[in-house]
Image: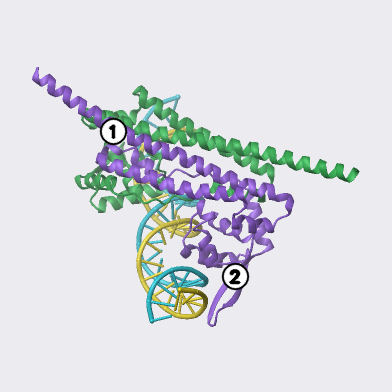
Chain colours: A green, B purple, C cyan, D yellow
Amino acid sequence: MSLRNALLALLTVEPMTGYDLAKRFGSSVGNVWHAPDSQIYPELRRMLQDGLLESEEVPWGRKGRKIEYTITEQGRVAFGEWMDSDLQWTRDRDPMHLRAAYFEYATPDRARDQLAAYREHILQLRGQWQQQIDEVIAGTSETLNRRLETVPASQHRRTTAFKRFTYEGLVDRADVEIAWAERGLKLLDELDDLDAQDELGALSAQDA
Amino acid sequence: MSLRNALLALLTVEPMTGYDLAKRFGSSVGNVWHAPDSQIYPELRRMLQDGLLESEEVPWGRKGRKIEYTITEQGRVAFGEWMDSDLQWTRDRDPMHLRAAYFEYATPDRARDQLAAYREHILQLRGQWQQQIDEVIAGTSETLNRRLETVPASQHRRTTAFKRFTYEGLVDRADVEIAWAERGLKLLDELDDLDAQDELGALSAQDA
DNA sequence: TGAGCCATGTAAATAGTTACATGATTAA
DNA sequence: TTAATCATGTAACTATTTACATGGCTCA
């Protein structure tokens, strides 16, 4: 259901085509919910059938066409209800931590590579999120500004605050993940050192 | 593929039944990878077909039976290869942050409820993870001790260190999530206060 | 004898991924 | 004219969830 509601969230601002929405899933909402086009197009048609959206075929150039989806009143109500509903907590799928728990089965150098790659990956995401924060603060976030135009001025403060709050949470989380990866890299070094010392100890015991 | 490898990880220690494994997915590995029984039983049969496991039907009581799965050499190799393979980063599905980004569409009190519930939820997970750490340190972790019996003494330090490292990462992450939820609760209060002040301001302007 | 646990599954639906497939438009 | 982007989809597969379904074992 989250995909559906992520789509509704975007469509509360303005009508969009499947392509527009797919692009947003590569940037704005994409930061908290990812979906490929192949999932978006069919879902839009289902939402249309369920009365949450209306569609209009718009000519595009000479022969092209595109389909603009507009959220209906029913769609707005459904989104509001979802926003007020309880979330179910089902988040326990974490490939990196699953791996880390069994690193003794990996080649030490590969474990190192993986932690380093993880750090880089999170670092990159962190950069994107921080940029969102910067834009929200500077007032240059296009998606936010477009949204603000559609809500009363009294709501601007809240709307802005929640975007910032969300991204700050993501950045903070990224920071601990990066620190964790770095701690892992240090740990791998320490374990190698300790093993080397043990070997030396064993050798000198042999000598004696 | 992670489910398969989580199962292999558990079976590197000792043969187990589907039920045993399902229980583990409610505790040990369950902390980093969740799976319901209905997914485990079919997957075990697929793994059997692929030669990663061997099975033995063991009588259980008078009429009962159970099926013990043992990892094969091929299974160990496959697990080692997976441990050395690159992970693909596909983690951008986060219902709580998706919601938080659009809290202006929720009733303020419901937003509060949700953040509070989230904090409690993470707090509970944090407790479980911290307990794992305590047990690893105290040497009273049954799953870890059973695993240590199957690996050479020279590997004990690494094996223990990686479990601890993993859970510490989870606890640290839980801590930022809790802090984030609390920041959100504070933010909701502040926004309400500011709105109230604005109203007062508007009223006194009217009076004058 | 009943409650709680041990044990194994099936069915149906939903969600998500990957690969394929096609064609139009726009701007350099 | 060609590359990048806009645009919409299908097919096949894999993963995951939820609900159902059955029955034996153990201990109080």
Asked if badges 1 and 2 are on one and the same chain, I answer: yes
Q: Residues within 10 Å of mark 2 (few under 14, many from 20)?
A: some
In the rendered image, the quadrant that contains the N terminus of chain B is bottom right
Q: Is residue A68 visible?
A: no
- Figure quadrant of residue A31: top left
- Nearest the viewer among A27 and A82 is A82
Q: Position of residue B102 (x, y in %)?
A: 31, 38
Which numbered disc covers residue B189? 1
State the residue lying farthest toward the left: B207
Q: Counting other residues with Cα less than 10 Å from the Cα at mark 1, is it few (<14), some (14-19), or many (20 or more)?
A: some
Instruction: State the residue in front, B190 or D6.
Output: B190
Mark 1–mark 2 contact, CB under 8 Å? Answer: no
Image coords of residue B137 (percent x, y): 61, 47
Label 2 resides on the chain identified as B
Which chain is indicated by disc 1? B
Most extreme residue toward the right is: A208
Say which residue appears at 56% left-offset and 38% top-offset.
A180
Residue at x 52% of width, y 49% of height: B131
Residue B45 appears at what percent x and percent y?
55, 68
> Does A191 appear above or below B65?
above
Seen at 54% across and 67% down, the residue is B18
Q: Where is mark 2, residue-wise?
A: B68
Q: Which image quadrant for residue B55? A: bottom right
How many numbered marks have been drawn onto this rendered protein structure?
A: 2
Which residue type does callout 2 highlight? Glu
The secondary structure type at the circle numbered 1 is helix
Q: Residue at x 80, y 43 (%)?
A: A199
